[in-house]
Image (spheres, helix red, strand yellow):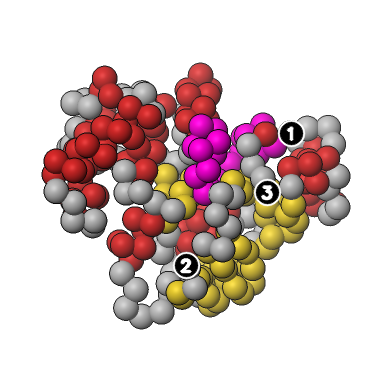
Amino acid sequence: MIIDIKHLSKSFGNHEVLKDIDFAVHTGDVISVIGASGSGKSTLLRCLNLLEMPTSGEIYYRQENILSRGVNAPKYRAKVGMVFQNFNLFNNMTVLQNCIVGQTDVLKRSKAEAAETAMFYLEKVGMTPYINARPRQLSGGQKQRVAIARALSMNPEVLLFDEPTSALDPEMVGEVLAVMKQLATEGMTMLVVTHEMSFAREVSNRVVYMNEGVICEQGTPEEIFGNPQKQETKDFLSRFINT
């Protein structure tokens, strides 16, 4: 088990966004987190990446509680990387520089080693022709592929994807999903908040349905899509598929 979440809750003021979440991620898992907007999916990921501090509960990474004092957040984030909805690239840097900076700053790699690693992953996502381009010169799909290469360059154990295709034009969604599918086949451990039901159904080994801050139901894609047990899950999925 890489990540173990116990009794995780998160409130913003009086609004409880996550309620008593228990959840585990094992090596090689591809977990799709689905649910309506506002169900707490992105907040769960942001807590996992320490971008939000949970109100209560524990998050264990390799048996260490990452919410305890003295945890090095940047180092932890190198191991549990995140790909954002809006790419979060540095606009004043080239594609290659975007993929080097975290390696040299956090992992203390030499510039040469960082560049070699960056080039390897940029090639993997098909972005080597654009290494000298700046983000403003790229399409949304290209930006997201660079963001994935940047996260991979840190050699993470887990990648968190926060609705990675929702800011993209429809014709660009496929190119990003293709990269993610390839990563899944190579054994990358992934936790994906997504509205792409075909990805959840075809690529995941586990699907988690969240509703109003709780994990309402989870299981294999066959169980969740083929035989959902809870009425809320059935109602949600009926908008996408005839279950």
**N-terminal label among 1 and 2:** 2
Q: Distance between the residues labelled 1 and 2?
A: 34 Å
Type of amino acid under label 1:
Phe
Is the residue 242 above or below the residue 79 in the image?
Answer: above
Type of amino acid under label 2:
Tyr
Residue located at (55% from left, 36% from top)? 185
Report x, y in % for residue 237: 77, 40
Could you classify mark 3 by the number of other residues whose Cα lies within 10 Å: few (under 14), some (14-19), or many (20 or more)? many
Circles 1 and 3: CB atoms closer than 8 Å: no
Left or right placement of residue 109 versus residue 35 in this view: left
Q: Is residue 220 visible?
A: yes
Circles 3 and 2: CB atoms closer than 8 Å: no
Q: Is mark 2 on a helix, strand or loop?
A: strand
**N-terminal label among 3 and 2:** 2
Numbered tag placed on residue 240 in the rendering: 1
Report x, y in % for residue 62: 48, 68
In the rendered image, which residue does mark 2 sit on? 61
Q: How far apart are marks 1 and 3 (CA)?
A: 18 Å
Is the residue 7 above or below the residue 199 in the image?
Answer: below
Nearest the eye: 128 or 216: 128
Nearest the eye: 110 or 6: 110
In the rendered image, which residue does mark 3 sit on? 206
Q: Is mark 3 on a helix, strand or loop?
A: strand
**N-terminal label among 1 and 3:** 3
Q: Give the range drawn in magenta.
A: 181-201
Residue located at (47% from left, 30% from top)? 179
Type of amino acid under label 3:
Arg
Q: In which quarter of the image is residue 147?
A: top left
Is residue 75 rendered magenta in the image? no
Could you classify mark 2 by the number of other residues whose Cα lies within 10 Å: few (under 14), some (14-19), or many (20 or more)? some
